[in-house]
Amino acid sequence: MQVPFPRAADAPAQDGRAILRVAIAGNPNSGKTTLLNQIVGSRFAVGNWPGVTVERKEGTIEFQGRRVQFVDLPGIYTLAPVSDDERIAYAYLTNEHPDVILNVIETPRLERALSLTVELAALGIPMVVALNMTDEAQRAGLSVDCRKFQELTGIRALPTNGRTGQGVRELLPAIVEAHWLQQRPQLRIAQGGFDEVMPASSQDAQTSVAEGLYHAVARRDAIRGRQLSAAVDGVLLHPVIGLIAYLAIMYFFFKISFDFSAPYMDWLDGFIGGYLGGIAKHALGLIGAPDLLIGFVSEAVIGGVGFVLTFVPLIATMFFLLTLLGMSGYMARLPFLLDRFMNRLGLNGKAVIPLLLGLGCNVPAVMATRTMEHRRDKIVLTMMIPFMSCPARLVVFSFFAGLFFPDHAGLVIFALYVLGIVVAVLTSLLLKGTLFKRSAAPVIIELPPYRMPRLRTVGAIVWSHVREFLHRAGTLIFAVSVVVWALVRLPLGAKPQDSIVAGIGRAITPVFAPLGLDDWRVSSSLIPAFLAREVALGFMATIYAAEDEAEDEPAFDFVAESRAQLEALGQAVIASLRAVLGLSIQTFSVEEDEGTNALRTAVRDSFTPGSALAFMILLLLYNSCLGVFGVMRKEVGHAYALAFLGWSFVVGWVVAFLVYRASLLL
């Protein structure tokens, strides 16, 4: 029988139809996001709650001719508003007044989860309980009497399995019915027996009701289901073997992320810039478009889009592996291993992963700070990540180190990496001693059973993160790409040395002159370097007029170019597989660029070893790139992002100054 869908009490949608708002609440790792994916598919969106960086997921589905909107609240253990997660959940439930609460319970941990259930019931909002992970509960010898649960609480309880979709089809009708009939919870059980209707407003009373309810509805046979998890934990949580295993897992996580994605990133760069840009040039040329318009479309528009899209393979691969580790249960065990060490930096063990990711790319590393439960930890960690040297910096380091320190290039590059880590640690200690004096926020260390993630759910989560990156960081990066392109070419027809960017370079040269960087061509290269570090070399080549005179481009051959792109894609697939199968991390194997001999000669005449080292230090420590700034601005706010720009510039300038002055003495 189809349940009538309520109308009058619902909030109006933009198209005039009613919306039933459902808040999904539950403990961390209870499977809320997995259920959301099962209900609405991949149509859920990931963002941040207003004013904080706690992740927000929501999705809408059509049901019985109306819309049902699901909002996945942060995973919490209590409604007592202490942490950001708890404050958000409590504020939403009490201020936004959702129509129904879908309380997702990790059934194997029913006894603990019922404490939150009782607190939610006290709000008086119609509620449906999803007894999730019932397969694991059965393996653990736990069964729940759903009929008795409803008799004692007035709440309908349905067994579900978010991984397989079992029981999910029954949730929507139950939610609609709970709202239509206004089935408000009526808890009638206390410890020791039945009672009258009990509001359970006090914490002691809620605990008593939760315990009594558990004993009334749950039956546990002989424990038989967690032997495998216990055996694996005996290795992965061992104080020595576990740490070695963690380092190995992180090594291969890092290797797969960057070695797998690098060939595709290179291919995308050539496909968008060379192939699509070539098509645009050819098409605009056929219609007689002016050269300035052709350059704007092919270089600024298509080039800007290409710069954004080249990050997608890396971000998708990273979040794919992160999601696998998280849904498998391994990520929940990291604080147990690393919490003591990271506490010395004012953080907890979860901070290690974003810091490691920063060695490959700071953009997804900043996005990965969402694993931190507290805003304070997210801010401190975000302020550390940009000091982790990424391969984009390595391109510049390899060029300058090989040119000015040919006998010690490897040592110089290694020292730069260590310097970045040292400055990141000092930044954390400084924040811990000033703005965030309190000790690291404690975390509840929960060890869920190991699980096999479903690829469909993993794919939906990965796509939501990629889509968010394109929306958040992509728009800002594209806009600034267009601005930088214009500054290099304005006034119209001007040569690079007469452009606006050259004028800006001359204006800022006095700031960098104490570092030995007293050439406007060098200081102006720092402007596009903010867009991407490796752009500095290409910009220098243009400014120094070191590149060969441009020859007339051959006519664009669509068939030949398309065939070449297909071949390049095939080569990228092969290169990606070969790189992953090897043991070394090939991301850091930077080959010498061809056609840079003239640039080397010009740079050698403009730098000294001391000023070259100062230049590298400045590129290392000053905020890594525009993409990082864009993500920082979205994750921790405009004020903190700007504050980091100032802090990183001051630190970079001071360290570069000291190193340059020391080189003069030596």
Image (tube, helix red, strand yellow):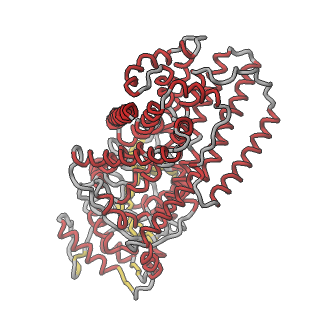
Rendered residue at 31%/65% (across/down) = 444
Q: Where is residue 174 shown, x and y percent of the image?
A: 44, 63
- Asked if residue 35 is positioned above or below residue 482 in the image, the reply reads below
In-front residue for pair 289/46: 289
Q: Is residue 235 left or right of residue 380?
A: right
Instruction: Say which of 259 and 514 sits in front.
Output: 514
- 326 or 595, which is in the foreground? 595
Residue 492 % position (x, y): 58, 11
Compared to residue 469, the image places residue 580 above or below, namely below
Q: Is residue 411 above or below residue 234?
A: above
The image quadrant that residue 585 belongs to is bottom right
Residue at point 22%, 71% (across, down)? 207
Q: Is residue 67 visible?
A: no
Q: Considering the image in quadrants, where does the C terminus appear? A: top left
Residue 528 visible in the displayed image: yes
Q: Position of residue 520 (x, y in %)?
A: 47, 19
Pick out the residue farthest to the bottom: 222
Q: Residue at x 33, y 33 (%)?
A: 654
Q: Position of residue 25 (x, y in %)?
A: 36, 59
In this view, the residue farthest toward the front is 666
Q: Is residue 460 left or right of residue 334?
A: right
Number of numbered markers:
0
In this rendering, the answer to whether 249 lies above or below 262 is below
Q: Is residue 465 left or right of residue 515?
A: right
